[in-house]
């Protein structure tokens, strides 16, 4: 009695097609650099908290490129292409978005600082030195209720003494003398931050008339924005203003 013909099993088919070698099935391993890229991409949202963290998405992209090259060299031996695509997309998105957010924030912070400095210059040029000097006070201590500036800076008091001393500085003599036709030109800004305030150092070029022609000197104005209520100029304070 003849035996029914049996359908070859997958193992037998694999054995036959492999030429009788010991290889039973294809083996693929996960690309190590793809794993590292995925881990770094998962940490990429930290880039939103501080510019130093921008290195994380950058590293994720660099490692991702290295992993992509490995996939090109070994297209049939490595796993993880789809995960690598997602990791690269996340890292690029977080890196670009974090940088854009930082750049836009710095732009508006600089614009507010410039507006506050313009306010100070404007008060000096319009014969309001007391109001200009008040901008050096903490925002919550300005214009105390029931007291005008004249009373607050009455002759003989400590406030008046400090004010008179400041008015004798070189830059104040120039900025408050209309006969010298003083002017200012913004050059650049530098930023810093403390737990309670954001500090912007503004560099200006101050020009005025002299007997032998127009003179120019660089000037640094440092202003800080206190983390207070969102009212125009309410959170800003002049820290210093002097020739460089």
Image (cartoon, rainbow, N blue to C red):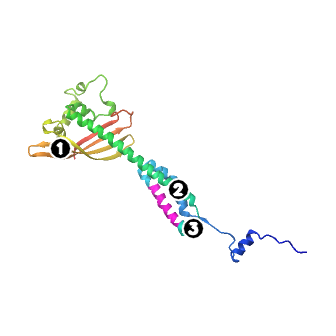
Horizontal placement of 48 versus 24: left or right? left
Mark 2 neighbour class, 10 Å CA radius: few under 14, some 14 to 19, many 20 or more: many
Horizontal placement of 126 versus 237: left or right? left
User: Of marks 3 and 2, which one's residue comes earlier in the chain?
Assistant: 3
- The residue tagged 2 is 87
Q: Nearer the viewer, residue 9 or 79?
A: 9
- The residue tagged 3 is 75
Q: Compute the Cα span from label 3 to label 2.
A: 19 Å
Q: Is residue 92 above or below residue 157?
A: below
Residue under the point 28% across and 44% down:
202
Question: Secondary structure of the magenta portion, mostly?
Answer: helix
Point out the image quarter for the N terminus: bottom right
Q: Nearer the viewer, residue 155 or 19?
A: 19
State the image coordinates of residue 132 (x, y, percent, origin top left): 24, 33
Q: Is residue 70 above or below residue 101?
A: below
- The residue tagged 1 is 207
Q: Is residue 118 visible?
A: yes
Closer to the eye: label 1 or 3: 3
State the image coordinates of residue 224 (x, y, percent, origin top left): 33, 40
Q: Nearer the viewer, residue 152 or 212?
A: 212
Q: Which disc number belongs to residue 97?
A: none
**Residue span colored magenta:** 55-70
User: Of marks 2 and 1, which one's residue comes earlier in the chain?
Assistant: 2
Residue under the point 29% across and 41% down:
114
Regarding mark 3 in the picture, which secondary structure is present there? loop
Residue 79 part of the magenta segment? no
State the image coordinates of residue 71 (x, y, percent, origin top left): 54, 66
Residue under the point 49% across and 58% down:
60
């Amino acid at each position: 009695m003849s035996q029914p013909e049996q359908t070859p099993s997958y193992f037998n088919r694999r054995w036959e097609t492999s030429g009788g070698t010991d290889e039973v099935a294809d083996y693929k391993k996960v690309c190590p650099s793809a794993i590292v890229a995925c881990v770094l991409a998962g940490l990429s949202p930290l880039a939103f908290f501080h510019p130093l963290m921008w290195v994380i998405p950058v590293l994720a992209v660099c490692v991702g490129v290295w992993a992509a090259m490995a996939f090109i060299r070994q297209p049939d031996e490595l796993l993880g292409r789809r995960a690598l695509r997602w990791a690269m997309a996340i890292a690029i998105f977080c890196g670009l978005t974090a940088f854009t957010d930082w750049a836009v924030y710095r732009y508006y912070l600089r614009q507010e600082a410039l507006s506050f400095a313009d306010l100070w210059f404007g008060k000096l040029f319009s014969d309001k030195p007391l109001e200009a000097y008040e901008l050096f006070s903490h925002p919550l201590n300005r214009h105390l209720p029931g007291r005008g500036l004249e009373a607050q800076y009455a002759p003989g008091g400590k406030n008046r003494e400090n004010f008179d001393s400041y008015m004798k500085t070189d830059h104040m003599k120039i900025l408050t003398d209309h006969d010298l036709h003083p002017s200012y030109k913004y050059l650049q800004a530098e930023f810093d931050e403390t737990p309670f305030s954001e500090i912007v150092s503004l560099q200006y070029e101050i020009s005025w008339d002299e007997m032998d022609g127009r003179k120019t000197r660089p000037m640094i104005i440092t202003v800080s924005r206190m983390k207070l209520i969102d009212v125009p100029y309410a959170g800003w304070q002049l820290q210093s203003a002097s020739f460089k």
